[in-house]
Amino acid sequence: MNEALLDIGEVARLSGLAPSALRFYESKGLIEPAGRNGHRRAYRPVVLERLGVIKCARSAGFSIAEVASFLTARPGDGMRERLTAKADSLDDQIAQLTRLRDSLRHAAVCEHDPVVECPDFRRAIGRVPARD
């Protein structure tokens, strides 16, 4: 078998994914083995880049179906509009997480008792509008 191929165990180790996740992604058409090395699946090294895209998209909240659509997207198939909508959604999530991060940093040094009642804490996470 071609020495450039990586067996499923090596791909799992290098990608940080369990072999079962690799088999699942294969069953969903997200990745494709290049062949077999004995009874073990073997992949081209480029699969690691694809798995990086999959992991990033999944961590951003993409469903398996959305990842599959993204990986096969072609210009003019409506994917650009869906990707723009997903990017807008991610912007909202980032803003929310930024507010949460800022409120947690404030809470770590705040003397208010309880911290969650602190006006600065609550404003930081967006629950209470700032007073002018």
Image: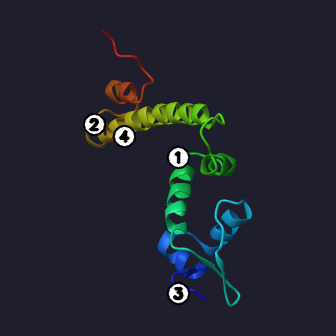
Specify few, some or many for label 2: CA neighbours under 10 Å numbering under 14, 14-19, or 20 or more. Answer: some
Q: Name the residue under label 1.
A: 60
In the image as oriented, which residue stretches furthest toward the right?
27
Q: What amino acid is at disc 4?
A: Arg
Pointer 1 or 2: first along the chain: 1
Q: Mark 2 points at which residue?
A: 110
Q: How far apart are marks 3 and 1 (CA)?
A: 34 Å
Give me the residue at 33% from left, 12% from top.
131
> Residue 125 occupies which quadrant of the picture?
top left
Specify few, some or many for label 4: CA neighbours under 10 Å numbering under 14, 14-19, or 20 or more. Answer: some
Dot 3 falls on a residue whose secondary structure is loop
> Residue 120 occupies which quadrant of the picture?
top left
How many numbered circles are shown? 4
* Camera-side residue of 122 and 59: 59
Pointer 3 or 1: first along the chain: 3
Q: Name the residue under label 4.
A: 101
Q: Mark 3 points at which residue?
A: 3
